[in-house]
Image (cartoon, rainbow, N blue to C red):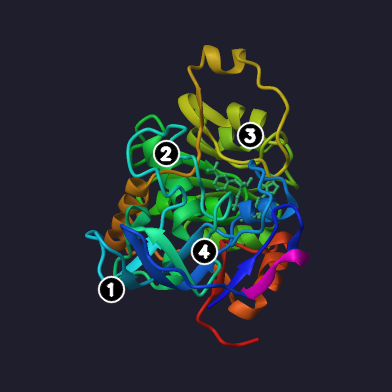
Amino acid sequence: MKAYQILPGANIDALRCIDYPDRQLGHGEVRIRVHAVSLNYRDLMVASGNYLVNVDDPIIPCSDGAGDVLETGPGVTRVQVGDRVAASFFPYWQDGRTSPEKIRHALGGDIDGMLAEEVVLHEDALARIPASLSFIEAATLPCAGVTAWNALFVSSNGTKPGDTVLLLGTGGVSVLGLQLARAAGLRTIITSSSEDKLRRARDLGAHHTINYQATPEWHEDVLALTQGRGADVVLEVGGKGTVNRSVAAAAMGGTVAIIGGVSGFGGEVNPASLLSSAKRMVGIFVGSRAMLEALMRFADVSGLKPVIDRVFPFAQAQQAYRYMESGSHFGKVVIDVTSQDN
Ligand SMILES: NC(=O)c1ccc[n+]([C@@H]2O[C@H](COP(=O)([O-])OP(=O)(O)OC[C@H]3O[C@@H](n4cnc5c(N)ncnc54)[C@H](OP(=O)(O)O)[C@@H]3O)[C@@H](O)[C@H]2O)c1
């Protein structure tokens, strides 16, 4: 079978499609025919060597994939041949609070990921895909979707319908966050550098949109739009260039979910900016299989259809990475592993 490999840090040009040897299934393992893989900013970080881990050998990249079960190994009870499944970002974090043990490995980070025609995973790493989601849609959920779910509904301070959420930019996490928030009855404010993307966000139901380039003091607009109150939850993906404005834009007792650093990490947050307003900052590191399962259920019940910006055939994985790198996407970029096109 064919699989892509990359040496972390060797850059996108080093992404190669190779013939990958099949291996026998061990106890509890499952062979999955991958149908679709979605890209995350993190996959660009792995390629450029800016991701957290040091790896000396090439790996199969990408955390987010969906497919069907081809074969089950001895002792497998959770899934059957033919089941439609997605893999959880952290294969050892099934439920509960995180721990070093649970996040010791991450797909496509320090161990092989999903950008292959077939993968072998432990059954505990798998979540069933509801019939309402296609493989392409389901492949968008394990990283970006679970991260947004965790920030909005698990690690925040009890988000309720009618609360306000602030989303930064229109990448994968933020657009899924917008869709989840709308489906859950939250008021949504989203920023972007592009008027066209803001129009698309309004088409998706965003209540308010702000161009963060035209309005560099965008946190003041958030306060004005909320009658001075601020956002109950902020999905902070910007990093050093945005974090202080995100704190300023949060409501008293609100949560700033620290997710990413598209403008780089670093900078300082004055503890006093949290103190008397009882604001919380909480680190988000994707989430557990249980969160992925809860998200799948929610998607099924609410009819959520993740926004897919563009789908590339398997042979064009490098082009898909380059497109993601260009930042022109709105929502998710997906690779159709079953497509034979060049
Ligand atoms: N902690 C976790 O568990 C976790 C999980 C997933 C992702 N992340 C992190 O979250 C970040 C976003 O990931 P992603 O996959 O959603 O990325 P993505 O799809 O590549 O989206 C990046 C978006 O960020 C926006 N952006 C860039 N500079 C900005 C700024 N100064 N202010 C506001 N928005 C800005 C741009 O939106 P416009 O084009 O609309 O301007 C761009 O489209 C990354 O840093 C990633 O590593 C963390």
Locate the C terminus by quadrant. Answer: bottom right
Q: Nearer the viewer, residue 260 or 103?
A: 103
Q: Quadrant of residue 99?
A: top left
* Cβ–Cβ under 8 Å for marks 4 and 1: no
**Residue where numbered disc 4 is placed:** 114
Q: Nearer the viewer, residue 14 or 307?
A: 14
Residue 197 visible to an observer of this rendering: yes
Magenta-drawn stretch contains 14? yes
Type of residue at label 3? His
Which badge, 2 or 1, is on the more N-terminal residue? 1
**Residue where numbered disc 3 is placed:** 219
* Cβ–Cβ under 8 Å for marks 4 and 2: no
Q: Nearer the viewer, residue 110 or 13?
A: 110
Type of residue at label 2? Lys
Indicate yes or no: mark 1 CB to ligand 1 under 8 Å. Answer: no
Label number found at residue 81 = 1
